[in-house]
Image (spheres, rainbow, N blue to C red):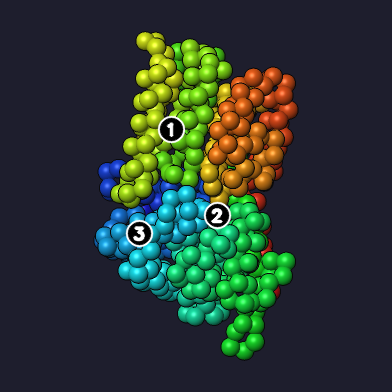
Amino acid sequence: MSDTVSDTTAEADFVVVSNRLPVDRSPDDEGWRRSPGGLVAALEPVLQSTGGAWVGWPGQSDLDLEPFAFDGMELVPVALSAQDVELFYEGFSNDTIWPLYHDVISPPTYHREWWDAYVRVNERFARAAASVAASGATIWVHDYQLQLVPRLLRELRPDVVIGYFHHIPFPAYGIYSQLPWRRQVLEGLLGSDVIGFQRAADAGNFATAVRRQLGYETKAGAIRVPTADGARTAVARAYPISIDAAVYDELARRPDVQARAREIRAELGDPAVVLFGVDRLDYTKGIGHRLKAYGELLTEQRLDKTEVTLVQVASPSRERVTAYMQLRDEIELAVGRINGDHDTVGHSAIRYLHHAYPREEMVALYLAADVMLVTALRDGMNLVAKEYVASRVDGRGVLVLSEFAGAADELTQAIRVNPHDIEGLKDAIMTAVEMPVAEQRRRMRALRRRVRDHDVAGWSRTFLADLETARR
């Protein structure tokens, strides 16, 4: 692991721009360590081979750093003040855009000062990216926090090729049109040459918004964008993101991880069935719907409370946002009520874990679980579903997957559910619990093939190839 400050910022032929840098401060605060996550895994090799640069916030407010090198990448920190974090990140990004784009599961809040901060911070990111990009460079912008950056970049650097990938859903026009700054956001995104979405439906929603709001011609994913000297074409299409499947497969085959999986089941009291859910503690994930269905199955005695345990990992998320504080209270109240009704002295109905866990422990949990419950009310992709599949080297296990997660388009051998339909969700859980081993293996074989053949490296290659086509 390297942590050296470079004398100058080299001009980069490939630049990634995202809200966060691909590193975190070490626990001792004396250096940096690589962040976990699929995006870093996908783009790090490209940056290392091209000598590219990554522009992002270092994760602490009021931290003004010079560019530095880390493991063959040039990292370009963008400083955010505590007020920026409050207004741009916690405010407009996560209390306006996030709920709006997730079908208003929680009501979005509109504040003009939040929008002003969003514009100001996007300008800062665009200037930082423009300053490190070589002539004719490729710049790839990521996610909803930076939707204005593509147009700002095009104004600053008309010589570069610009891609943008939207990691969360893009809503239907009837919802999107509520945004007071809807035209500015669309114009910001259309600064890109290629605009990527998780699902074809998201790309279609975006094209509809462009037609309805801006009146631009759209056809088969191609959008005609007027310019001062005529028009250019922007491409908007689906590029479903994935995981580094080989890493999860390799971890799941390690004897120590398999031993830990057996140990987890023993710690749970060796129940006949282990159900598993792992999510950020977010209102889009349908955790409450999952708990309601499970609690009713226990009450109706369709599940034997002495033979089944639900392990629910809910990692902390956006803990200063009011909606998330309320959600935590609701979930913990529901867990307490179900455990109060169904626990025995030697057995717990739900093991609720409000922590984040390292990847090795997560793979052990995936191996220990008979049924994986992914009940998102709206999700761009949901990589947890793919992680579970990639970890099941034994060919067993059942995935129950919400049709409102992007992963449902690809993982067609999962048991699909509408999480709003509690009776249907209960029936799906029972189907999973009672599924014969032969049927589990047949489904899991197809699921694993899909995840293996469409991994995160393939995702980045496909997107970058289309950017190269746009350059030509």
Q: Which residue type carries mark 1?
A: Val
**Image point (53%, 44%), residue name:** 377
Q: Which of marks 3 and 1 is nearer the N terminus?
A: 3
Q: Which residue type carries mark 3?
A: Gly
**Image point (48%, 65%), residue name:** 178
Determine if residue 256 is in view.
Answer: no
Secondary structure type for disc 1: strand
Distance of label 2 from label 3 (alpha carbons): 19 Å
Q: Position of residue 393 (x, y in %)?
A: 63, 28
**Image point (47%, 66%), residue name:** 179
Q: Which residue type carries mark 2?
A: Pro
Q: Where is residue 469 in the image (x, y as percent from the top left)?
A: 69, 69
Nearer to the camera, 67 or 453: 453
The quadrant of the rendering that contains the C terminus is bottom right
> CB under 8 Å between callouts 1 and 2?
no
Determine if residue 434 is in view.
Answer: yes
- The answer to which image quadrant residue 283 occupies is top left
In the picture of the structure, the residue carrying the numbered disc 1 is: 313
Where 305 falls versus 132 (above or below)? Answer: above
In the picture of the structure, the residue carrying the numbered disc 3 is: 91
Q: Please tell me the numbered disc located at residue 116.
A: none
Q: Please tell me the numbered disc located at residue 169.
A: 2
Q: Position of residue 238 (x, y in %)?
A: 65, 57
**Image point (53%, 70%), residue name:** 186
Distance of label 1 from label 2 (alpha carbons): 23 Å
Q: Position of residue 323 (x, y in %)?
A: 36, 48
